[in-house]
């Protein structure tokens, strides 16, 4: 079987979305809507993938390199959209037509449809399904013996009769055409409808009039063909996509404790035996290895996580957590953070653009920004790296085996040597040599009888 050319129609304005964002660029679980049918076409083995864009070219730079763009010069209907891609089609290959606003079509459904088309030696095959509420969809009209007769559009009043509107079988907007037959029919389309547009389903009627076989292939799962016209349908598609993603992870050996409270983008990769606790959100290019525990209540975006790491109640973005590291609860990992093997970032700790060494601990109530901390160090509660002088950011360097006490501020640029110590409450402004103790605080003095003298001074006020 020849690998198909896939054409994805994505030039519609989507006015019912009530948005400045083009409809097909709205996000569904980490991918723009149009990227879903593109991915399905690629997985189905498409020879070429063509997306039809509008003259404003909103999709420029938003699609993968293997996707070609054709421009529909005017909004003249689905037939006009496919005609805009005609120069990129091949008469000797089947042509699959998908819609950019029908995002959940699967690679399996595409392969199944192409297979049915080849088996029936059809000039065209349309995917159909039954809906309880078919409002807004083109209706499939069948003749004697259930043979596909025509597809009636229902965009505006007058396109369909009352009897036709009562039909529950709908056109999913997914087709397979013989390439030569399609190229021969497109120039003969006419805008003889209330919209004054060129309707792609009219190609089916033209082919039937020529005596060619036009087939209908029913798809049992309406979710695969869910079209999106407004924000309500967008929400429905997101929920279906979310469940599909989580199910795939579960079947691959990931333990998602409460799927209903978990969000995982389509682009996330999770290793076997990793546990995702409730109320966890995994976004973007987040990757976690095996036997990790993520959450509860973690939100991680573009975070790379090694094996056997634990990330509890943490917000992280553009960070890396290596094997066996522990984060949280209530930690914040900002861009540029690297937590090396078996390091620990504890409660109410914020790390930014810093390299935390193997086995190093930043247990609680600290801010470490623009710093390099060596292996096996321990920074006490309330540690602060003062990295900004009002004009520039500066780095702090803390060596291996350093013991930083509580409430220590390191005023960058400053270097603390290997095996050095810093005393509690110090403000370190100068370098601390290897093995030294840095103390930077006023010497304590006690004033005897202070409370009695203060009480005596206040006595006249009481009387």
Image (cartoon, grey):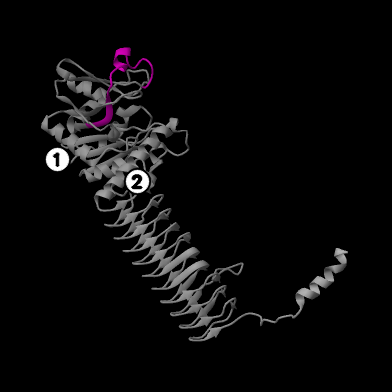
Q: Is residue 125 above or below residue 368?
A: above
Q: Which residues are magenta?
A: 155-175
Residue located 46% across and 73% down the image: 372
Q: Residue 225: name its quadrant.
A: top left
Q: Residue 133: name its quadrant.
A: top left
Question: Is residue 160 one of those drawn in magenta?
Answer: yes
Q: Nearer the viewer, mark 1 or mark 2?
A: 2
Say which residue label 1 marks.
2
Q: Residue 42: name its quadrant.
A: top left
Say which residue label 2 marks.
259
Tell me where residue 168 appears, x and y as whole percent. 28, 21
* Mark with earlier residue (1, 2): 1
Q: Quadrant of the C terminus?
A: bottom right
Instruction: Identify the secondary structure beneath mark 2.
Output: helix
Which residue is more in the foreground, 396 or 394? 396
Q: Is residue 414 above or below residue 139?
A: below
Left or right: where 112 falls relative to 399: left
Q: Is residue 155 above or below residue 111?
A: above
Tell me where residue 123 appears, x and y as whole percent. 16, 28
Left or right: where 322 falls relative to 462: left
Which residue is more in the foreground, 450 or 351? 450
């Amino acid at each position: 079987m020849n690998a198909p050319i896939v054409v994805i129609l994505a030039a519609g304005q989507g006015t019912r979305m009530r948005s400045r964002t083009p409809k097909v660029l709205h996000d569904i679980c980490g991918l723009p809507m149009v990227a879903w049918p593109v991915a399905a076409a690629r997985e189905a083995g498409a020879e070429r993938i063509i997306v039809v864009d509008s003259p404003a070219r909103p999709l420029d730079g938003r699609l993968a390199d293997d996707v070609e763009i054709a421009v529909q010069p005017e909004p003249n209907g689905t037939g006009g959209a496919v005609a805009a891609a005609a120069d990129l089609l091949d008469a000797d290959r089947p042509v699959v037509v998908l819609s950019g606003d029908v995002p959940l079509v699967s690679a399996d459904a595409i392969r199944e449809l192409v297979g049915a088309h080849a088996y029936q030696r059809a000039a065209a095959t349309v995917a159909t399904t039954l809906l309880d509420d078919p409002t807004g969809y083109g209706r499939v009209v069948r003749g004697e013996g259930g043979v596909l007769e025509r597809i009636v559009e229902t965009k505006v009043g007058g396109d369909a009769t009352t009897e036709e509107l009562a039909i529950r079988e709908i056109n999913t907007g997914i087709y397979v055409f013989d390439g030569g037959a399609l190229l021969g029919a497109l120039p003969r389309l006419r805008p003889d409808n209330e919209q004054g547009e060129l309707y792609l389903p009219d190609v089916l009627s033209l082919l039937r009039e020529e005596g060619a076989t036009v087939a209908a292939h029913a798809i049992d799962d309406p979710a695969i063909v869910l079209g999106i016209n407004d924000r309500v349908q967008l929400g429905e598609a997101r929920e279906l996509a979310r469940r599909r993603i989580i199910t795939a992870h579960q079947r691959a050996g990931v333990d998602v404790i409460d799927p209903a409270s978990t969000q995982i983008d389509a682009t996330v990769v999770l290793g076997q035996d990793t546990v995702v606790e409730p109320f966890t959100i995994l976004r973007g290019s987040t990757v976690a290895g095996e036997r990790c525990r993520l959450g509860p209540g973690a939100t991680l975006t573009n975070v790379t996580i090694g094996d056997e790491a634990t990330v509890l109640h943490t917000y992280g973005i553009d960070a890396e957590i290596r094997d066996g590291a522990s984060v949280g609860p209530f930690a914040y990992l900002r861009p540029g953070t690297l937590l090396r093997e078996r390091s620990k970032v504890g409660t109410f700790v914020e790390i930014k653009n810093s390299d935390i060494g193997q086995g190093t601990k930043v247990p609680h109530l600290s801010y470490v920004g623009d710093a390099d901390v060596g292996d096996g160090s321990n920074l006490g509660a309330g540690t602060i790296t003062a990295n900004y002088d009002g004009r520039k950011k500066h780095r702090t360097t803390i060596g291996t085996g350093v013991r930083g006490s509580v409430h220590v501020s390191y005023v960058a640029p400053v270097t603390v040597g290997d095996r050095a110590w810093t005393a509690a409450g110090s403000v370190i402004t100068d370098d601390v040599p290897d093995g030294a103790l840095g103390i930077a605080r006023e010497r304590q003095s006690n004033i005897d009888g202070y409370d009695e003298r203060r009480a005596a001074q206040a006595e006249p006020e009481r009387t």
